[in-house]
């Protein structure tokens, strides 16, 4: 458990950063996005693979699937942190460095990874050129439309603005997911994260993401998200749609995550994506303190968020 005193004082590398007024408003939203991702992941982990619960779950519980205590995040957050660390170290997107970071994270707990990423990282560890591994895994698995590249992608949106969001979202996705639909879904989410962190309103961020989406299937489903019931699944488009739906329909961070994880299914990933969007919109201070206090690894996530925001701005 962490003692949270939020006025908003965050400790980083021995220095105390005081967040007040408008000076650090973008940092609050950038940190909210990454911490929100971790909170959503940890909140949803106990419900992963289960049907939608009959009674609404509002608190983090023990993850029997992963054998982890309440507040522990999964590979969803580990991969997002790996993406963030690589962006900071390389001062932007470096496919070689990012793959190395992702593989290193994978080696610590490979059993919890999804089928696409696991296959790619195993091939790389066996000596395959990382530039060939995603295509090979796509062919071996007969597809790569799973949601792993979407859940790890929001640091791209925190780091980049402008057309670079789409360019590097697709490139980051392609490291493991050869299917272009996965890249389009990641680009859509990351564009919204980028705009929300920089102060755009929710509807404006949605319209901009839709206008920049070049994949007809993704634009069709996400653009008409209210016409489809949300389904929390491993498919990248289903997970993106479910996350977007709850984010667009709820009006607080807490209610967004409650709605997301109670869909069941791939609850940790939908919780992570929805949490990143909601954190980018509402900011760090909107995340319930009881959830922050329960989140294992909060100092690491906060420190990474600060570095990501600070280094991206020179």
Image: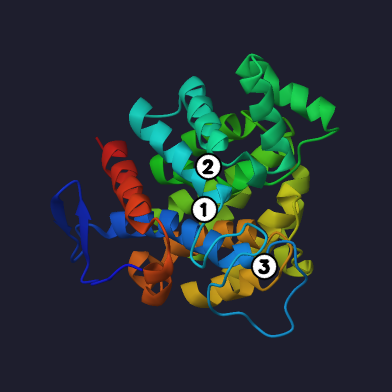
Screen quadrant of the C terminus: top left
Q: Nearer the viewer, mark 3 or mark 1?
A: 3
Q: What colouring does the structure picture have?
A: rainbow
For the residues bearing labels 3 and 1, Cβ distance under 8 angstroms: no
Q: Position of residue 132 (x, y in %)?
A: 68, 17
Residue 240 left/right relative to 190: right
| Residue denoted by label 2 | 79
Q: Residues within 10 Å of mark 3 (few under 14, many from 20)?
A: many
In this orientation, which residue lies closer to the viewer: 146 or 127?
A: 127
Where in the figure is residue 294, as x and y percent of width and height? 42, 69
- Residue indicated by mark 1: 192
Q: Quadrant of residue 141?
A: top right
The local secondary structure at tag 3 comes to helix
Q: Is residue 34 left or right of residue 187?
A: left
Q: Which mark is residue 56?
A: none
Q: CA distance from mark 2 to mark 1?
A: 19 Å
Residue at 79% x, 66% y is 228
Q: Quadrant of residue 160?
A: top left
Residue 255 in percent (x, y) is at: 54, 77
Instruction: Looking at the image, tell me whether mark 2 or mark 3 is earlier in sequence order.
Output: 3
Name the secondary structure under disc 1: helix
Disc 2 crowd, CA 10 A, few/some/many (<14, 14-19, 20+): many
> Which residue appears at 49% of the width and 75% of the height?
254
**Residue 81: horizontal and vertical position, in percent?**
45, 43
Say which mark, if any, is on residue 47. Answer: 3
Q: What is the number of callouts on the image?
A: 3
Asked whether residue 190 is in view, the answer is yes
Toward the viewer: 274 or 249?
274
Q: Residue at x 20, y 71 (%)?
A: 7
């Amino acid at each position: 458990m962490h003692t949270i005193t939020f006025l908003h004082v965050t400790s980083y590398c021995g220095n105390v950063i005081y967040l007040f007024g408008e000076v650090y408003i973008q940092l609050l939203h950038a940190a909210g996005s990454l911490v929100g991702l971790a909170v959503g992941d940890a909140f949803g982990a106990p419900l992963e693979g289960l049907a939608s619960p009959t009674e609404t779950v509002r608190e983090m519980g023990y993850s029997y699937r992963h054998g982890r205590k309440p507040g522990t995040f999964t590979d969803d957050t580990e991969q997002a942190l790996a993406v963030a660390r690589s962006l900071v170290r390389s001062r932007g997107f470096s496919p070689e460095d990012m793959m190395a970071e992702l593989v290193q994270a994978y080696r610590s707990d490979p059993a919890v990874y999804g089928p696409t990423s696991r296959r790619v990282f195993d091939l790389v560890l066996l000596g395959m050129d990382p530039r060939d591994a995603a295509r090979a895994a796509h062919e071996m698995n007969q597809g790569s439309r799973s949601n792993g590249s979407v859940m790890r992608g929001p640091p791209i949106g925190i780091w980049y603005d402008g057309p670079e969001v789409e360019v590097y979202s697709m490139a980051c996705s392609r490291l493991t997911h050869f299917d272009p639909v996965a890249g389009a879904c990641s680009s859509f989410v990351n564009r919204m994260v980028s705009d929300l962190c920089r102060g755009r309103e929710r509807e404006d961020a949605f319209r901009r993401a839709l206008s920049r989406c070049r994949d007809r299937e993704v634009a069709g489903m996400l653009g008409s998200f209210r016409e489809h019931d949300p389904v929390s699944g491993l498919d990248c488009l289903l997970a993106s749609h479910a996350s977007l739906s709850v984010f667009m329909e709820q009006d607080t961070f807490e209610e967004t995550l409650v709605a997301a994880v109670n869909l069941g299914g791939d609850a940790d990933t939908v919780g992570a994506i929805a949490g990143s969007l909601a954190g980018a919109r509402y900011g760090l201070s909107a995340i319930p303190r009881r959830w922050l206090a329960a989140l294992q690894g909060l100092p690491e996530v906060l420190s990474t968020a600060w570095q990501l925001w600070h280094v991206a701005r020179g």
